[in-house]
Image (spheres, rainbow, N blue to C red):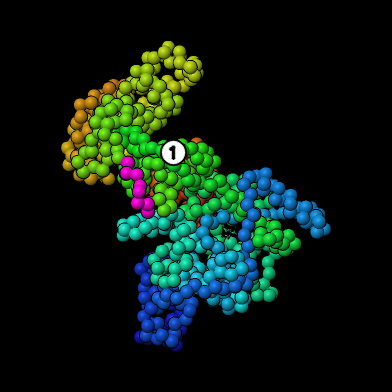
Amino acid sequence: MTFADGDSEADRVAQLRELIAHHSYRYHVLDDPEIGDDAYDALYSELRELEAEHPELVTPDSPTQRVGEVPVSDLVKVEHLQRMLSLANVRSAAELRAWIVRMRNFLAREGIEDPVFEFVAEPKIDGLAMSLVYEDGLLARGVTRGDGQTGEDVTHNLRTIAQIPLRLRAVAPPPLVEVRGEVYMSLPDFQALNERRAAAGESTFMNPRNSAAGTVRQLDPRLAAERPLSFWAYQLGVVSEGVGFATHWAALEWLRELGFPVHPDIRVISGEDEVVAQCERWQERRGSLDFEIDGVVVKVNDLELQRRLGVVGREPRWAVAWKFPPTTALTTLLDIGWNPGKFGDLHPYAMLAPVHVGGVTVKQATLHNEEDLARKDLRIGEPVIVLRAGDVIPQVVGPAPHVAERSDRPPKPRPPERCPVCATPTVKPEGSVFTRCPNRDCPGRRLQLLTHFVEAMDIEGLGERQVLAFMERGWLQSAADVYRLPEREQQLLALTGYGETSVRKLFDAIEASKARPFGRVLFAVGIEEVGDVTGRALAQQFGDVDALLAASPEELAQTPGVGPKMAAAIHAQLGDPAMRSLIATLRAQGLNFAQDRTPGREGPLAGLTLVLTGTLPGLTREQATALIVDAGGKVTGSVSKKTAYVVAGDSYGSKLARAEALGVPVLDEAGLLELLAGHGGGGVESSSS
Ligand code: IVH
């Protein structure tokens, strides 16, 4: 093989290594690739071939050396250059303030009066602490925390982590650099891994942390290479003399320059209130991150103050961990209840011995559906693990560890033979995995269907509780009855909790719901398989309800996103006399059964793709999506260069970081509303980088 004049193969190999390291860094650390996968693969293959021809050119920092082939026979114990400390915990704002007072008192005794504290707040990543030692810029070894004094050499596995540089990005790196950080498995990677394992009939991991721990301690690096681990750097360890920083923040910035991933939302803050606020902010966004955190680490920024504060026992005085309330707990599965959904599918839920988790007492938890229940292999009477993260509904994760290995387990729970609400014998339709109540007049089914209707039509003041109360009085049987409620003004006024104002508001909300677009009405009336998006698509395809009702299954299948099976199911339901009569009544009552314009072609957001992240103060995700789609825009899940705007709520996930990296403008809710009103880009808060 020949190259441009003067280039030897050794030069090309060096050049390829540099290119690959650069592109790997852009992709894995900055999340902002400059070239496509194919181009990257081509560089990699070329390097592999050259190295195969010239084994003498292989160096330990070559990217080809990430996928190790030689298993180690043992994990070798290694003494740390500097002790790896643990952290004292605080669990409330008061405890955090007490920590700051303790530091002040300590420093006062040392003769430092009224220190001005700056803090750095970092996510406390739920993974494994690692010490990475770089000698002359090359990764020499990676060691687990162990007992803090001595850890285990797991370099062979850490090399497989693309985010860990094999060589520091510096022209003249100091002879010794120790970097500390957390090896973890991201939630998407963890889920994918467990799905793969389940499909292969292998046991699944309990949580990302266990999965990362099991992976990092493998002897065979090929195993580690198959299980994607990630890394966040959070601390500079020992460095050669002459390298120094005034603050922890400056050290983090340097780590970033050297090519390490440092979380983009780590902040320097001053003042106790801000520290507390920052911890609470992380706590709120906990559920929207794509890796698990179990708290926030707060560190004193000034390294000289850190030195003066020193260490007590195994804990530094200058840092604490603000721990979130635990989100999993162990309790007993008392029974399994079943509730019919809006189409009669019986949804199981767990009845639990009351347990405190995630800051509340939990007595019930969702189990999604029959398949979920079977997959989790739960048995009544056994201990189970309950998860409650953020504001989400509590979930049963699975049986407690080792329970599944017992031989004397209670029998598998089975769906009931009769509907628990109306006692109609249940059925399992052919080809379905779900047991259902076939009775269309089942009050349980109706409650769900009507609740779905009022929620889809966005009628403020009507929710499940009110629907149930009105059903019990015989005022609500079908969606059409919602529009007859105004005839019951006197009856409503007689109810506790309903005064003139609230009744007026309710009637206004009912009236306003008549303006919902045709597509939304199609979603609201409850046609199986027709969600919000399909409702919209059908409305757009057929224009009005007469055309829709006249459509053959083949014609229905012309609708984007509707396949032949779905078309047949929709056709059958639209032909049902009860559905026809409901549609006729709602039409007579003044609901929209025709499309008045074609979204997607015009509108202030025509042709633009937006990404939503976090919780908006005044709009649900569905509402925001509907507004954007109605204005001609599109909503997707991941930020790319093609994203026109990222709309971010008060929490600020990795999508926001990516938007900033790509220079995609970020809007808040007000900015979105202005954009929708057609003030092109007004109120846009453009990202600074
Ligand atoms: S600093 C004195 N920063 O928490 C410095 N630790 O209990 C001690 N951890 O073993 C570590 N995220 O596994 C630090 N941003 C962060 C961290 C972090 C997670 C873990 C680490 C350590 C444990 C301390």
Quadrant of res 298: bottom right
* Residue at image location 27% in from the left, 38% down from the top: 435
Q: Quadrant of the C terminus?
A: bottom right
* Residue at image location 66% in from the left, 61% down from the top: 314
Residue holding disc 1: 352
* Percent position of residue 505, x then y: 46, 21
Quadrant of res 71: bottom left
* Residue at image location 55% in from the left, 63% down from the top: 129
Q: Is residue 469 magenta?
A: no
Q: Furthest residue to the front? A: 408
Quadrant of res 423: top left
In this rendering, does residue 195 appear at all? yes
* Percent position of residue 305, x then y: 73, 60
Q: Which image quarter has ligand 1?
A: bottom right
State whether residue 2 is above or below residue 67: below
Numbered range of the magenta stretch = 404-413
Query: 318 or 172: which is nearer to us?
Result: 318
In this rendering, does residue 255 appear at all? no
* Percent position of residue 389, x then y: 49, 45
Query: What's the amino acid at mark 1?
Result: Leu
State whether residue 597 is above or below residue 188: above
The answer to whether 60 appears left or right of 558 in the picture is right
State whether residue 632 is above or below residue 245: above
- SS for dot 1: strand
* Residue at image location 57% in from the left, 48% down from the top: 324
Q: Furthest residue to the right? A: 111
* Percent position of residue 484, x then y: 35, 18
The answer to whether 496 appears left or right of 297 in the picture is left
